[in-house]
Amino acid sequence: MATQTLPAKRTGKAGSTLFLKTVMAVSGLIFVLYVLLHMYGNLKVFWGEEAFNTYAHHLRTIGEPMLPHAGLLWVIRVVLIIAVVAHVYSAAQLWKRANAAREQKYAVKKAVAASFSSKWMRWGGVALLLFVIWHLLHFTIAKINVGSGGQGSEITQNPYQLVVHSFGAWWMVIIYLLALAALGMHLHHGIWSASQTLGFTNTPQQRKIAKTVAALVALVVAVGFALPPLFILFGVID
């Protein structure tokens, strides 16, 4: 009776590269889910100060009394921190390997320039990371009122007022919109890449669906996040 030959186990650099890409894909999908939920929360600003502040307070009381105050929020933060570390580490390692491979392949002749999307995913990702750090300092950690008017804690301890005063500053809205453009492009390319890595693009129909989902999610997130600051800047929300 013929013996069945088992497939060889993937090891070495090729296997670990696939693992790194999978880590990037999974951690990236965690971010996609988070930004969609975060966008939904931001849109609460259209329902007024009471609704928005109630939402902000409810985030810290979900799960009580089984969980401590802000318990679930901290679980989410820990998951996001782990995902950020995994995503950045995987991206850095893949970037390093890509550069090393390019140097070896084109040791004599000039290296071929990387595609725009690849370069954007790298440097756009760095820009987004810096923006996220500022965003956390602005609205969560330090609660900085960059707008005019208001008295100290009266603004910074009121989530709705902090948002309204912050986006009353035109330059803050410009920074935010630039970050959203970067986020939209990152999501578009990232979702498509994750779909390829996870095996969701094996047929023409699957590739079409993946491209459509990537474009739709990127557009919805960018527009959804942009609406509150623009409506605040032009005085529709005050």
Image (cartoon, helix red, strand yellow):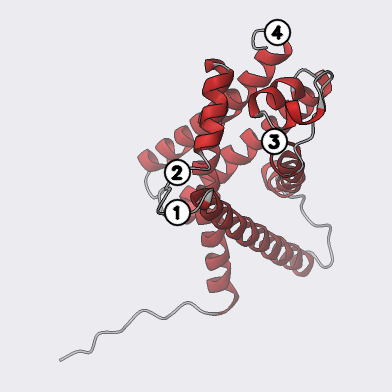
Looking at the rendered structure, the secondary structure element under dot 2 is: loop
Q: Considering depth in this image, is 161 or 76 the residue closer to the camera?
A: 161
Q: Which of the 4 image quarters holds residue 235?
A: top right
Q: Give percent across and percent down for residue 166.
A: 76, 24
Report the residue marked by disc 2: 62
Can residue 152 be seen? yes
Q: Nearer the viewer, mark 3 or mark 4?
A: 4
Which quarter of the rendering shows the N terminus?
Answer: bottom left
Report the residue marked by disc 3: 182
First in sequence: mark 3 or mark 4? Answer: 3
Q: Which of the 4 image quarters holds residue 24?
A: bottom right
First in sequence: mark 1 or mark 2? Answer: 2
Question: Badges 1 and 2: C-beta atoms under 8 Å apart?
Answer: yes
- Disc 3 residue type? Ala
* Residue at the image point whose x is 80% and y is 57% from the top: 111
Label 1 CA crowd tier, 10 Å (few <14, some 14–19, many 20+): few
**Distance from label 1 to label 2 (Cα)?**
8 Å
Report the residue marked by disc 4: 235
* Residue at the image point whose x is 47% and y is 77% from the top: 10
First in sequence: mark 4 or mark 1? Answer: 1
Report the residue marked by disc 1: 67
Q: Give percent across and percent down for residue 151.
A: 81, 24
Question: Badges 4 and 1: C-beta atoms under 8 Å apart?
Answer: no
First in sequence: mark 2 or mark 4? Answer: 2
Q: Considering depth in this image, is 172 or 115 the residue closer to the camera?
A: 172
